Image: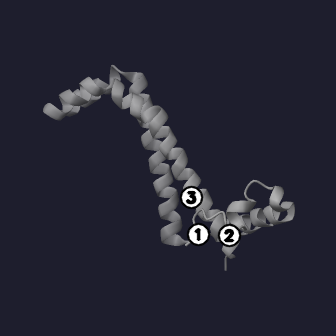
C-alpha cells in the first residue's frame, strides 16, 4: 500500500510531465506548425499522402520539431496509461517511498516539501 505522501509525489510527477509536454508544444510545436502553415493549408484543401510526405521532406526542421512534440506526448500518454491500467509496480512504489523518506529527512528545506507534506501546497490534493 502506498502512503498518501507517495501518492502525492506521484501526482506531482504526473503534473510535471504534462507541464513539460505543454512547454515543448509551446516552444517547439507551435513554431513548427507556424512554419508549415502554407503546407497545412494546402493539405487541408486537398489532402494526399504524397503531399504530406513532400511537405515534411522539404521542410525538415519544422517536421523534426513536430516529431519531437508528438513523440514526447505519446510517451507521456503511454507512461500514464500503463500506470492507470496496471498500477504501480513494486519497484516504483519502493522508489516513491524512498524519495518521500529523503524529502521527510531533509525537512522543510527540501524544495518538494510544501507540495508533499504541507496542506497549503495543494497541488494535486483531492
Q: Residue 32 versus residue 90: which sits nearer the camera?
A: 32
Q: As drawn, which residue projects farthest toward the right? A: 105
Q: Which residue is mark 3?
A: 14
Q: Which residue is mark 1?
A: 125
Q: Nearer the viewer, mark 2 or mark 3?
A: 2
Question: Label for residue 52?
Answer: none
Q: Do the residues under discs 2 and 1 have CB atoms within 8 angstroms?
A: yes
Label 2 element class = loop
Dot 1: what SS?
A: loop
Residue 76 at x, y percent in the picture: 50, 52
The reply, left or right, for residue 99 in relation to residue 68 is: right
Q: Decide which of tag 2 and tag 3 comes sooner along the chain.
A: 3
Name which quarter of the figure residue 96 lies in. bottom right
Q: Which residue is the extreme one toward the top?
A: 58
* Neighbour tally class for label 1: few under 14, some 14-19, many 20 plus, Cα within 10 Å: few
Residue sitting nearer the eye, 53 or 122: 122
Q: Position of residue 14 (x, y in %)?
A: 56, 58
Distance between mark 2 and mark 3 Cα atoms: 19 Å
Residue at left 58%, top 52%? 16
Vertical relation: 30 (above or below) 115? above
- Answer yes or no: is residue 45 visible: yes
Q: Quadrant of the C terminus?
A: bottom right
Q: Which mark sits nearer the N-terminus, 1 or 3? A: 3
- Look at the image and tell me whether residue 47 can be seen: no
Amino acid at each position: 500500500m502506498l502512503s498518501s505522501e507517495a501518492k502525492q509525489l506521484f501526482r506531482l510527477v504526473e503534473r510535471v510531465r504534462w507541464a513539460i509536454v505543454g512547454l515543448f508544444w509551446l516552444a517547439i510545436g507551435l513554431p513548427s506548425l507556424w512554419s508549415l502553415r502554407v503546407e497545412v493549408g494546402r493539405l487541408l484543401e486537398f489532402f494526399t499522402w504524397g503531399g504530406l510526405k513532400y511537405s515534411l521532406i522539404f521542410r525538415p526542421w519544422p517536421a523534426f520539431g513536430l516529431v519531437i512534440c508528438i513523440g514526447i506526448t505519446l510517451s507521456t500518454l503511454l507512461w500514464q496509461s500503463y500506470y492507470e491500467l496496471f498500477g504501480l509496480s513494486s519497484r516504483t512504489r519502493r522508489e516513491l517511498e524512498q524519495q518521500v523518506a529523503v524529502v521527510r529527512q531533509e525537512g522543510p528545506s527540501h524544495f518538494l516539501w510544501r507540495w508533499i507534506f504541507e496542506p497549503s501546497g495543494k497541488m494535486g490534493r483531492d
